Amino acid sequence: MKRPPIVIVGASLAGGTAAVTLREDGFDGDIVLVGAEAQPPYNRPPLSKGYLRGQDRFEDQLVRPASYYAEQRIGLELGVRATKIDAGQKLVELEGGRRVAYDRLLVATGGRNRTLSVPGANLAGVFQLRTVEDCDRIRAAVARGRRAVVMGFGFIGSEVSASLRQLGIEVVAIEGARVPLARIVGDEVGQVLADIHRDKGVELITEDSVAALEGSGRVERVRTTKNRVFECDFVVAGIGIVPNTELVAAAGARVDNGVLVDERCGTSLPDVLAAGDVTNHLHPIFGRLRVEHWNNGYQQGRAAARSLLGGTQPYDYVHTFWSDQYEHVIEYVGFATSWDRIVFRGRPGSRKFLGFYLKDGIVRAAVGLDRGGDPEDAKGDSELKAAVDMVRARAAIDPAKLADESVDLRALAGARV
Ligand SMILES: Cc1cc2nc3c(=O)[nH]c(=O)nc-3n(C[C@H](O)[C@H](O)[C@H](O)COP(=O)(O)OP(=O)(O)OC[C@H]3O[C@@H](n4cnc5c(N)ncnc54)[C@H](O)[C@@H]3O)c2cc1C
Protein backbone atom coordinates (compact mmCIF):
# COMPACT_ATOMS: atom_id res chain seq x y z
CA MET A 1 0.00 0.00 0.00
CA LYS A 2 1.21 3.49 -0.85
CA ARG A 3 2.51 5.45 2.12
CA PRO A 4 0.72 8.70 2.91
CA PRO A 5 2.60 11.88 2.01
CA ILE A 6 4.92 13.99 4.06
CA VAL A 7 2.69 16.97 4.81
CA ILE A 8 4.15 20.40 5.45
CA VAL A 9 1.90 23.04 7.02
CA GLY A 10 3.15 26.56 6.32
CA ALA A 11 4.26 27.29 2.75
CA SER A 12 6.80 30.00 3.29
CA LEU A 13 10.57 30.00 3.74
CA ALA A 14 11.00 27.10 6.18
CA GLY A 15 8.22 24.95 4.71
CA GLY A 16 9.16 25.64 1.10
CA THR A 17 12.85 25.04 1.75
CA ALA A 18 12.03 21.75 3.49
CA ALA A 19 10.01 20.58 0.47
CA VAL A 20 12.85 21.51 -1.89
CA THR A 21 15.39 19.73 0.32
CA LEU A 22 13.29 16.56 0.50
CA ARG A 23 13.42 16.31 -3.29
CA GLU A 24 17.06 17.38 -3.56
CA ASP A 25 18.01 14.71 -1.04
CA GLY A 26 16.28 12.04 -3.09
CA PHE A 27 12.92 11.58 -1.38
CA ASP A 28 10.64 10.15 -4.05
CA GLY A 29 7.36 9.84 -2.12
CA ASP A 30 4.46 12.25 -2.04
CA ILE A 31 4.80 15.73 -0.52
CA VAL A 32 1.91 18.08 0.23
CA LEU A 33 2.63 21.70 1.11
CA VAL A 34 -0.28 23.57 2.72
CA GLY A 35 -0.16 27.35 2.99
CA ALA A 36 -2.63 29.97 4.19
CA GLU A 37 -1.21 32.58 1.83
CA ALA A 38 -2.22 32.61 -1.84
CA GLN A 39 1.36 32.83 -3.14
CA PRO A 40 3.92 30.04 -3.41
CA PRO A 41 6.71 30.29 -0.79
CA TYR A 42 8.46 33.65 -0.96
CA ASN A 43 11.12 35.61 0.91
CA ARG A 44 9.96 38.38 3.22
CA PRO A 45 13.16 40.47 3.69
CA PRO A 46 12.57 42.58 0.54
CA LEU A 47 9.15 43.61 1.91
CA SER A 48 10.80 46.19 4.14
CA LYS A 49 13.52 46.97 1.60
CA GLY A 50 13.69 46.78 -2.21
CA TYR A 51 10.12 45.56 -2.79
CA LEU A 52 8.69 48.25 -0.52
CA ARG A 53 10.67 50.84 -2.47
CA GLY A 54 9.37 49.47 -5.78
CA GLN A 55 12.85 48.34 -6.87
CA ASP A 56 12.52 44.54 -6.60
CA ARG A 57 9.93 42.43 -8.39
CA PHE A 58 7.82 39.96 -6.39
CA GLU A 59 8.52 37.12 -8.89
CA ASP A 60 12.21 37.38 -7.99
CA GLN A 61 11.49 36.79 -4.30
CA LEU A 62 10.06 33.30 -4.68
CA VAL A 63 11.85 30.46 -2.89
CA ARG A 64 11.46 28.53 -6.18
CA PRO A 65 9.70 29.57 -9.40
CA ALA A 66 5.96 28.84 -9.30
CA SER A 67 6.34 26.03 -11.87
CA TYR A 68 8.88 24.13 -9.72
CA TYR A 69 6.32 22.46 -7.45
CA ALA A 70 4.37 20.72 -10.23
CA GLU A 71 7.63 19.72 -11.92
CA GLN A 72 8.80 18.15 -8.67
CA ARG A 73 5.44 16.52 -7.85
CA ILE A 74 4.99 18.65 -4.75
CA GLY A 75 1.28 19.10 -4.10
CA LEU A 76 0.57 22.76 -3.33
CA GLU A 77 -2.53 23.65 -1.33
CA LEU A 78 -2.40 27.44 -1.28
CA GLY A 79 -4.82 29.89 0.25
CA VAL A 80 -5.92 27.12 2.62
CA ARG A 81 -5.42 27.06 6.36
CA ALA A 82 -4.85 23.85 8.28
CA THR A 83 -7.36 23.92 11.12
CA LYS A 84 -6.59 20.76 13.07
CA ILE A 85 -3.94 18.11 13.56
CA ASP A 86 -5.01 14.70 14.80
CA ALA A 87 -1.69 13.25 15.90
CA GLY A 88 -3.25 9.90 16.87
CA GLN A 89 -4.90 9.29 13.49
CA LYS A 90 -2.09 11.16 11.67
CA LEU A 91 -4.49 13.50 9.88
CA VAL A 92 -4.44 17.20 9.09
CA GLU A 93 -7.79 18.90 8.63
CA LEU A 94 -8.00 21.81 6.23
CA GLU A 95 -10.42 24.73 6.07
CA GLY A 96 -13.61 23.40 4.54
CA GLY A 97 -13.25 20.09 6.37
CA ARG A 98 -11.05 18.13 3.96
CA ARG A 99 -8.65 15.73 5.72
CA VAL A 100 -5.18 14.82 4.56
CA ALA A 101 -3.44 11.78 6.00
CA TYR A 102 0.27 12.13 6.71
CA ASP A 103 3.11 9.74 7.25
CA ARG A 104 5.22 12.51 8.78
CA LEU A 105 4.26 16.13 9.38
CA LEU A 106 6.32 19.31 9.39
CA VAL A 107 4.87 22.39 11.06
CA ALA A 108 6.33 25.61 9.64
CA THR A 109 3.60 28.07 10.52
CA GLY A 110 5.97 30.95 11.35
CA GLY A 111 4.64 34.01 13.11
CA ARG A 112 2.03 36.72 12.76
CA ASN A 113 2.07 40.36 13.75
CA ARG A 114 1.32 41.07 17.36
CA THR A 115 -2.13 42.66 17.67
CA LEU A 116 -2.03 46.44 17.78
CA SER A 117 -4.24 47.33 20.70
CA VAL A 118 -4.03 51.13 21.02
CA PRO A 119 -7.21 53.19 20.49
CA GLY A 120 -7.62 53.92 16.78
CA ALA A 121 -5.78 50.79 15.66
CA ASN A 122 -8.59 50.00 13.23
CA LEU A 123 -8.50 53.34 11.42
CA ALA A 124 -7.74 53.27 7.71
CA GLY A 125 -4.10 54.05 7.00
CA VAL A 126 -2.75 52.01 9.92
CA PHE A 127 -0.56 49.13 8.74
CA GLN A 128 1.55 46.26 9.95
CA LEU A 129 3.96 44.36 7.74
CA ARG A 130 4.30 40.62 7.34
CA THR A 131 2.90 39.61 3.96
CA VAL A 132 3.23 40.88 0.42
CA GLU A 133 -0.36 42.17 0.62
CA ASP A 134 0.57 44.18 3.73
CA CYS A 135 3.47 45.63 1.78
CA ASP A 136 1.29 46.46 -1.23
CA ARG A 137 -1.07 48.37 1.05
CA ILE A 138 1.84 50.39 2.45
CA ARG A 139 3.09 51.06 -1.07
CA ALA A 140 -0.35 52.42 -2.01
CA ALA A 141 -0.26 54.69 1.07
CA VAL A 142 3.24 55.89 0.10
CA ALA A 143 1.92 56.84 -3.33
CA ARG A 144 -0.76 59.03 -1.73
CA GLY A 145 0.93 60.28 1.42
CA ARG A 146 3.80 62.46 2.51
CA ARG A 147 4.13 61.93 6.28
CA ALA A 148 4.40 58.64 8.14
CA VAL A 149 4.64 57.61 11.76
CA VAL A 150 6.53 54.37 12.42
CA MET A 151 5.63 52.70 15.71
CA GLY A 152 8.50 50.70 17.18
CA PHE A 153 12.12 50.91 16.07
CA GLY A 154 13.19 47.28 16.03
CA PHE A 155 14.60 45.86 12.82
CA ILE A 156 11.29 46.04 10.92
CA GLY A 157 10.58 49.58 12.12
CA SER A 158 14.07 50.80 11.33
CA GLU A 159 14.17 49.17 7.88
CA VAL A 160 10.74 50.55 7.00
CA SER A 161 11.83 54.00 8.22
CA ALA A 162 14.91 53.81 6.01
CA SER A 163 12.91 52.76 2.96
CA LEU A 164 10.29 55.46 3.53
CA ARG A 165 13.00 58.10 3.83
CA GLN A 166 14.53 56.79 0.61
CA LEU A 167 11.13 57.31 -1.01
CA GLY A 168 11.05 60.90 0.23
CA ILE A 169 8.46 60.38 2.97
CA GLU A 170 8.75 62.39 6.19
CA VAL A 171 9.15 59.89 9.03
CA VAL A 172 8.55 60.21 12.75
CA ALA A 173 9.56 57.00 14.55
CA ILE A 174 8.40 56.37 18.11
CA GLU A 175 10.30 53.91 20.27
CA GLY A 176 9.90 53.06 23.94
CA ALA A 177 13.53 52.29 24.69
CA ARG A 178 16.13 54.94 25.45
CA VAL A 179 18.39 53.60 22.71
CA PRO A 180 16.75 51.73 19.84
CA LEU A 181 17.83 48.14 19.18
CA ALA A 182 20.01 48.22 22.32
CA ARG A 183 18.46 44.99 23.64
CA ILE A 184 19.97 43.17 20.68
CA VAL A 185 23.12 45.11 19.79
CA GLY A 186 23.88 47.11 22.94
CA ASP A 187 23.82 50.84 23.65
CA GLU A 188 26.84 51.93 21.62
CA VAL A 189 25.82 50.16 18.41
CA GLY A 190 22.18 51.11 18.89
CA GLN A 191 23.25 54.75 19.26
CA VAL A 192 25.26 54.60 16.03
CA LEU A 193 22.21 53.24 14.20
CA ALA A 194 19.96 55.91 15.74
CA ASP A 195 22.42 58.61 14.62
CA ILE A 196 22.42 57.24 11.07
CA HIS A 197 18.63 57.49 10.95
CA ARG A 198 18.61 60.99 12.41
CA ASP A 199 21.21 62.07 9.85
CA LYS A 200 18.92 60.73 7.15
CA GLY A 201 16.08 62.86 8.47
CA VAL A 202 14.09 60.48 10.66
CA GLU A 203 12.60 62.29 13.66
CA LEU A 204 13.35 59.55 16.17
CA ILE A 205 11.45 59.87 19.44
CA THR A 206 12.67 57.57 22.20
CA GLU A 207 11.37 56.76 25.69
CA ASP A 208 7.82 57.41 24.57
CA SER A 209 5.06 55.28 23.11
CA VAL A 210 1.90 55.66 21.08
CA ALA A 211 -1.14 56.26 23.28
CA ALA A 212 -3.73 56.70 20.53
CA LEU A 213 -4.21 56.93 16.80
CA GLU A 214 -6.72 59.62 15.93
CA GLY A 215 -8.72 60.69 12.88
CA SER A 216 -12.17 60.45 11.41
CA GLY A 217 -12.23 57.16 9.54
CA ARG A 218 -8.61 57.47 8.48
CA VAL A 219 -5.60 58.11 10.73
CA GLU A 220 -4.68 61.78 10.82
CA ARG A 221 -2.46 62.04 13.87
CA VAL A 222 -0.66 60.06 16.55
CA ARG A 223 -0.76 61.00 20.21
CA THR A 224 1.96 59.71 22.50
CA THR A 225 1.98 58.82 26.17
CA LYS A 226 3.96 62.02 26.81
CA ASN A 227 1.21 63.90 24.96
CA ARG A 228 3.19 64.76 21.87
CA VAL A 229 1.07 64.92 18.71
CA PHE A 230 2.30 64.06 15.22
CA GLU A 231 0.18 64.70 12.15
CA CYS A 232 0.51 61.94 9.57
CA ASP A 233 -0.97 60.37 6.45
CA PHE A 234 -0.33 56.78 7.50
CA VAL A 235 1.17 54.68 10.27
CA VAL A 236 3.30 51.53 10.10
CA ALA A 237 3.56 49.54 13.33
CA GLY A 238 6.55 47.25 13.78
CA ILE A 239 5.74 45.86 17.20
CA GLY A 240 6.91 42.29 16.84
CA ILE A 241 5.38 38.93 16.07
CA VAL A 242 3.92 36.02 17.96
CA PRO A 243 4.61 32.45 16.84
CA ASN A 244 1.68 30.58 15.24
CA THR A 245 1.62 27.71 17.72
CA GLU A 246 -2.15 27.28 18.26
CA LEU A 247 -2.57 24.53 15.68
CA VAL A 248 0.16 22.30 17.06
CA ALA A 249 -0.59 23.19 20.69
CA ALA A 250 -4.22 22.09 20.24
CA ALA A 251 -2.89 18.75 18.99
CA GLY A 252 -1.08 18.34 22.29
CA ALA A 253 2.47 19.47 21.46
CA ARG A 254 4.47 21.22 24.15
CA VAL A 255 4.68 24.94 23.57
CA ASP A 256 6.55 27.70 25.37
CA ASN A 257 7.29 30.83 23.32
CA GLY A 258 7.17 28.67 20.19
CA VAL A 259 6.70 24.98 19.72
CA LEU A 260 9.38 23.16 21.65
CA VAL A 261 11.61 21.07 19.40
CA ASP A 262 14.67 19.00 20.12
CA GLU A 263 17.99 19.15 18.29
CA ARG A 264 16.48 17.17 15.40
CA CYS A 265 13.47 19.46 15.02
CA GLY A 266 11.17 16.91 16.68
CA THR A 267 8.16 18.17 18.65
CA SER A 268 6.75 16.25 21.61
CA LEU A 269 4.28 14.55 19.19
CA PRO A 270 5.34 11.43 17.27
CA ASP A 271 6.27 12.04 13.61
CA VAL A 272 5.57 15.76 13.94
CA LEU A 273 8.54 18.08 13.37
CA ALA A 274 8.74 21.86 13.23
CA ALA A 275 11.05 24.47 11.71
CA GLY A 276 11.50 28.23 11.36
CA ASP A 277 10.14 31.21 13.31
CA VAL A 278 7.53 29.02 15.04
CA THR A 279 10.11 26.89 16.88
CA ASN A 280 11.70 27.27 20.24
CA HIS A 281 14.59 24.96 19.52
CA LEU A 282 17.22 23.25 21.59
CA HIS A 283 20.62 24.30 20.32
CA PRO A 284 23.88 22.60 21.30
CA ILE A 285 25.62 25.97 21.82
CA PHE A 286 22.89 28.43 22.79
CA GLY A 287 20.46 26.21 24.69
CA ARG A 288 16.78 26.93 24.06
CA LEU A 289 15.97 29.83 21.80
CA ARG A 290 13.48 31.16 19.31
CA VAL A 291 14.78 33.43 16.59
CA GLU A 292 13.12 35.27 13.73
CA HIS A 293 15.88 35.17 11.13
CA TRP A 294 15.76 34.32 7.46
CA ASN A 295 18.93 32.23 7.76
CA ASN A 296 17.31 30.11 10.46
CA GLY A 297 14.15 29.60 8.39
CA TYR A 298 16.32 28.37 5.56
CA GLN A 299 18.79 26.29 7.56
CA GLN A 300 16.27 24.76 9.94
CA GLY A 301 13.95 23.99 7.01
CA ARG A 302 16.81 22.00 5.47
CA ALA A 303 17.69 20.35 8.77
CA ALA A 304 14.06 19.34 9.39
CA ALA A 305 13.83 17.77 5.92
CA ARG A 306 16.89 15.68 6.70
CA SER A 307 15.41 14.62 10.05
CA LEU A 308 12.16 13.71 8.25
CA LEU A 309 14.25 11.39 6.09
CA GLY A 310 15.76 9.71 9.15
CA GLY A 311 18.89 11.85 9.59
CA THR A 312 20.27 12.05 13.12
CA GLN A 313 22.51 15.12 12.76
CA PRO A 314 21.64 17.77 15.40
CA TYR A 315 20.71 21.21 14.10
CA ASP A 316 23.69 23.26 15.29
CA TYR A 317 23.76 26.19 12.87
CA VAL A 318 25.45 29.21 14.49
CA HIS A 319 22.71 31.78 13.98
CA THR A 320 23.29 34.79 11.79
CA PHE A 321 21.09 37.59 10.48
CA TRP A 322 21.45 40.76 8.48
CA SER A 323 19.65 44.05 8.10
CA ASP A 324 19.96 46.61 5.29
CA GLN A 325 19.26 50.24 6.15
CA TYR A 326 20.04 52.96 3.57
CA GLU A 327 23.48 52.16 2.16
CA HIS A 328 24.47 50.35 5.36
CA VAL A 329 24.66 46.62 5.99
CA ILE A 330 24.44 45.16 9.48
CA GLU A 331 25.50 41.54 9.93
CA TYR A 332 25.12 39.73 13.24
CA VAL A 333 26.41 36.28 14.17
CA GLY A 334 25.80 34.15 17.27
CA PHE A 335 23.22 34.79 19.95
CA ALA A 336 23.60 36.86 23.11
CA THR A 337 20.90 38.23 25.37
CA SER A 338 23.44 39.48 27.90
CA TRP A 339 27.14 40.18 27.94
CA ASP A 340 29.78 41.62 30.31
CA ARG A 341 31.52 43.71 27.68
CA ILE A 342 31.59 44.62 24.01
CA VAL A 343 35.00 44.81 22.36
CA PHE A 344 35.22 46.92 19.21
CA ARG A 345 37.56 46.53 16.28
CA GLY A 346 37.30 49.90 14.58
CA ARG A 347 35.62 52.84 16.30
CA PRO A 348 31.81 52.74 16.49
CA GLY A 349 31.76 56.45 15.55
CA SER A 350 33.49 55.58 12.26
CA ARG A 351 30.33 53.63 11.29
CA LYS A 352 32.53 50.83 9.98
CA PHE A 353 33.40 48.41 12.72
CA LEU A 354 33.05 45.01 14.34
CA GLY A 355 31.71 44.52 17.86
CA PHE A 356 32.24 41.34 19.86
CA TYR A 357 29.86 40.45 22.71
CA LEU A 358 31.78 38.65 25.46
CA LYS A 359 30.55 36.86 28.52
CA ASP A 360 33.03 35.24 30.90
CA GLY A 361 35.73 35.96 28.32
CA ILE A 362 33.96 33.95 25.62
CA VAL A 363 32.71 35.48 22.37
CA ARG A 364 28.95 34.82 22.30
CA ALA A 365 28.07 37.00 19.33
CA ALA A 366 29.48 39.64 17.00
CA VAL A 367 28.10 42.45 14.88
CA GLY A 368 29.54 44.16 11.84
CA LEU A 369 28.45 47.51 10.50
CA ASP A 370 29.68 47.78 6.90
CA ARG A 371 32.53 45.54 7.88
CA GLY A 372 33.29 41.87 8.34
CA GLY A 373 31.83 40.50 5.11
CA ASP A 374 29.06 37.99 4.75
CA PRO A 375 29.45 35.16 7.27
CA GLU A 376 27.51 32.94 4.86
CA ASP A 377 29.87 33.61 1.97
CA ALA A 378 30.87 30.26 0.47
CA LYS A 379 34.56 31.22 0.49
CA GLY A 380 34.30 31.38 4.27
CA ASP A 381 37.24 33.71 4.83
CA SER A 382 35.45 36.81 6.09
CA GLU A 383 36.05 38.43 9.48
CA LEU A 384 32.52 37.53 10.55
CA LYS A 385 33.05 33.92 9.53
CA ALA A 386 36.01 33.98 11.94
CA ALA A 387 33.59 35.29 14.57
CA VAL A 388 31.25 32.37 13.82
CA ASP A 389 34.16 30.02 14.45
CA MET A 390 34.88 31.77 17.77
CA VAL A 391 31.26 31.42 18.86
CA ARG A 392 31.25 27.78 17.88
CA ALA A 393 34.55 27.06 19.68
CA ARG A 394 33.28 28.67 22.92
CA ALA A 395 36.88 29.41 23.76
CA ALA A 396 38.16 32.45 25.67
CA ILE A 397 39.74 35.00 23.32
CA ASP A 398 42.07 37.77 24.46
CA PRO A 399 39.99 41.01 24.22
CA ALA A 400 43.11 43.08 23.46
CA LYS A 401 43.77 40.92 20.41
CA LEU A 402 40.16 41.14 19.31
CA ALA A 403 40.50 44.93 19.27
CA ASP A 404 43.94 44.99 17.66
CA GLU A 405 43.67 45.59 13.89
CA SER A 406 47.10 44.04 13.34
CA VAL A 407 45.94 40.66 14.64
CA ASP A 408 44.36 38.41 12.02
CA LEU A 409 40.91 37.39 13.28
CA ARG A 410 41.00 34.15 11.31
CA ALA A 411 44.20 33.13 13.09
CA LEU A 412 42.71 34.28 16.40
CA ALA A 413 39.62 32.13 15.85
CA GLY A 414 41.84 29.09 15.98
CA ALA A 415 43.79 30.33 19.02
CA ARG A 416 42.90 30.15 22.70
CA VAL A 417 43.97 32.39 25.55
C1 LIG B 1 9.25 42.68 6.39
C2 LIG B 1 10.20 41.63 6.88
C3 LIG B 1 11.57 41.81 6.67
C4 LIG B 1 12.47 40.85 7.14
N1 LIG B 1 13.81 41.07 6.95
C5 LIG B 1 14.70 40.17 7.42
C6 LIG B 1 16.09 40.41 7.27
O1 LIG B 1 16.53 41.40 6.71
N2 LIG B 1 16.95 39.49 7.78
C7 LIG B 1 16.50 38.37 8.42
O2 LIG B 1 17.33 37.56 8.90
N3 LIG B 1 15.18 38.13 8.57
C8 LIG B 1 14.27 38.99 8.10
N4 LIG B 1 12.92 38.76 8.25
C9 LIG B 1 12.48 37.54 8.96
C10 LIG B 1 12.25 36.36 8.02
O3 LIG B 1 11.51 36.73 6.92
C11 LIG B 1 11.55 35.24 8.80
O4 LIG B 1 12.46 34.77 9.77
C12 LIG B 1 11.08 34.12 7.89
O5 LIG B 1 10.07 34.54 7.04
C13 LIG B 1 10.60 32.90 8.72
O6 LIG B 1 10.12 31.93 7.85
P1 LIG B 1 9.07 30.83 8.33
O7 LIG B 1 8.81 30.00 7.11
O8 LIG B 1 9.54 30.18 9.55
O9 LIG B 1 7.76 31.62 8.76
P2 LIG B 1 6.79 32.65 7.97
O10 LIG B 1 7.60 33.41 6.96
O11 LIG B 1 6.08 33.38 9.02
O12 LIG B 1 5.80 31.70 7.21
C14 LIG B 1 4.83 30.90 7.84
C15 LIG B 1 3.75 30.57 6.81
O13 LIG B 1 2.84 29.65 7.40
C16 LIG B 1 1.54 30.06 7.06
N5 LIG B 1 0.61 29.51 8.05
C17 LIG B 1 0.48 29.85 9.36
N6 LIG B 1 -0.48 29.11 9.95
C18 LIG B 1 -0.96 28.28 9.00
C19 LIG B 1 -1.97 27.27 8.99
N7 LIG B 1 -2.67 26.96 10.09
N8 LIG B 1 -2.22 26.62 7.84
C20 LIG B 1 -1.53 26.91 6.70
N9 LIG B 1 -0.55 27.86 6.66
C21 LIG B 1 -0.29 28.52 7.80
C22 LIG B 1 1.61 31.57 7.07
O14 LIG B 1 0.53 32.12 6.33
C23 LIG B 1 2.96 31.79 6.38
O15 LIG B 1 2.83 31.80 5.00
C24 LIG B 1 12.00 39.70 7.80
C25 LIG B 1 10.62 39.52 8.01
C26 LIG B 1 9.73 40.47 7.56
C27 LIG B 1 8.24 40.29 7.78
Image: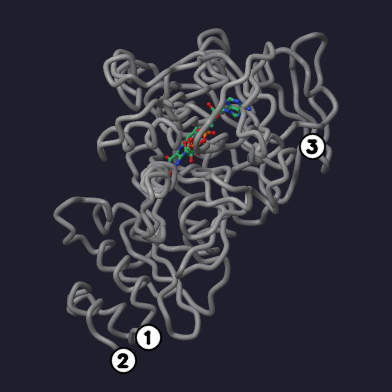
The residue lying toward the viewer, choosing from 43 and 101, is 101
Instruction: State which mark lies toward you, 2 or 3.
Output: 2
What residue is rendered at 25% in x and 37% in y? Answer: 26
> What residue is pinned by disc 3?
224
Sequence order check, earlier mark of 2 and 1: 1
The residue lying toward the viewer, choosing from 369 and 89, is 89
What residue is rendered at 44% in x and 17% in y? Answer: 76
Question: Compared with residue 80, is residue 367 higher up or lower down, i.e. above or below?
Answer: below
| Residue situated furthest front in the rendering | 1
Residue density around tag 1, few if under 14, some if 14–19, many if 20 or more, within 10 Å: some
> What residue is pinned by disc 1?
396
> What residue is pinned by disc 2?
417
Which quarter of the rendered picture does the N terminus lie within? top left
Label 1 sits on what residue type?
Ala
The residue lying toward the viewer, choosing from 414 and 3, is 3
Label 3 sits on what residue type?
Thr
Residue density around tag 2, few if under 14, some if 14–19, many if 20 or more, within 10 Å: few
Find numbered disc 1 in the image and state the secondary structure of the residue it sits on: loop
- Disc 2 versus disc 1: distance between alpha carbons? 6 Å
Instruction: Indicate if the residue with disc 1 has its beta carbon within 8 Å of ligand 1.
Output: no
Label 2 sits on what residue type?
Val
Percent x, y of residue 256: 70, 53
Query: Seen in the image, is 347 located left or right of residue 234?
Result: left
